[in-house]
Image: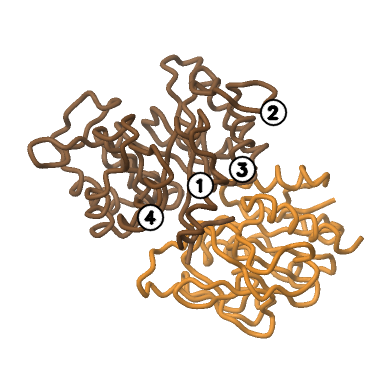
Amino acid sequence: MVAKRLIPCLDVHEGKTVKGVNFVNLREVGDPVQMGKFYAREGADELVYLDISATKEGRKTFITLVRSVARELNIPFTVGGGISDIDHASALLDAGADKITLNSAAICNPGLITEISKRYGSQFVVVAIDAKFEQNRWMVMSRGGTKDESKILSEWAVEACERGAGEILFTSMDHDGTKSGFACEALSDLCKIIPTPVIASGGAGTMDHFLTLFQSCGADAALAASVFHNREIVIGELKSYLHQNGIRVRL
Amino acid sequence: MTAIVDYGTGNIFSLCNAIEKQGNEFVVTCDPKLIYSADHIILPGVGEASSVMREIEIRSLTDTLKKVKSPVLGICIGMQVMCSFSEEGETDTLGIFKNRVNKIKSDGVKIPHMGWNRVENLKGPLYDGIDEGEWFYFVHSYAPDINEDTISFTNYSNLFSSSLNRFNFYGTQFHPEKSGAAGERFLRNFFMLNK
């Protein structure tokens, strides 16, 4: 069986990592390439780079960055942030990205998932879904969680898979930043209804949260940012802990 | 010089980088002369079996690829087309390995098989310095069965050949260029062949 995956997420703004702090032995703190290599050495299974630049220049810088990441990294990596058409996705593939994430653009134009997965395969397309629990339902949000799309998480996830998504990256906006654990119930439900791997995001605070996620929620991978960036959790230690508790991880 | 066989498919950026990192020069080519004269030959790992076979035939590379004497490494689909038959597109393939490539049975597992899995029962020089049960990175929905050419197997609902060898021909179902330090070692071992 495949190993459960741990995935640090790096937010990149104008070519620099936004939350790059407290790293030892890094030539330049905030350098996305150096941070990526650091995490790869520590045992990260994959990396996600999200472009949060708002400008055209920032976008161009990001493509250049993706090329450097591909040159330096020896593990798979996913890129995302503002991908709204197949040409943009193609440019990232050509720059060496293994996968892309689609979020808001896929909500506006679900055909984009179909188009990209048909051309490059499902394994290339991760659909990221941000959702919030409202009136007893998980509602899909877009544009950084500001707009209510009146889509329900489970329905949208199923549709995304039918259209060719190879993985679903689910972020609970209620848990994100709280460090109180992952949205276990919603994740369990999601894992039961979709055929593709599920990456859990939002709420990681302790090593126990990861253990619970893998033991009882059925998730295939966990994505986190701040707990890794500020060294509250060291990936190597987390992997040993999970392994000791019977979770299959790559050591 | 390493020849990466160009059959007009997908992204081989990571593979090229991995080869460069090993300090090897490479050329991406479908010219039989360059392929014959290369020290090492790589069949890259992107595409679908029947269309890759068609591209190989269009470029009249079938004989070349079967007759070369330098070490050859097929990665993922590159290895699958070196087998004898693929269920993907129901196509006859090069027949260098006698294996058949079957769709992975979805007995309670997700398809594609994507992520890190263990490679076991390691045989031969490509696994020098690599631990039994080492983790490698996989992305595929079809896999070769096990026979006398198998030099490692992997378990994903069923056992399949995660690497093959016959004479100077090698193949991996995993992507060494994405498999961290173990993958780098594997590629280094490949480039040590013929030296």
Task: Please give the residue where the numbered disc 1 appears in the rendered image.
Answer: A238
**Of A123 and A29, which appears nearest the observer?**
A29
Numbered circle sitting on residue A42: 3
Could you say which quadrant of the image residue B77 lies in? bottom right
Task: For mark 3, name the chain.
Answer: A
Q: Position of residue A102 (x, y in %)?
A: 36, 37
Q: Amino acid at mark 2?
A: Asn
Q: Amino acid at mark 1?
A: Leu
Task: Please give the residue where the numbered disc 2 appears in the rendered image.
Answer: A25
Viewer can see residue A47: yes
Q: Position of residue A126 (x, y in %)?
A: 39, 45
Q: Amino acid at mark 4?
A: Phe
Residue pictured at 41% horizontal, 16% vertical: A54
CA gap between label 4 and label 1 equals: 12 Å
Q: Tell me whether marks 4 and 3 sit on the same chain.
A: yes
Residue pictured at 31% horizontal, 31% vertical: A178
Task: For mark 4, name the chain.
Answer: A
CA gap between label 4 and label 3 equals: 20 Å
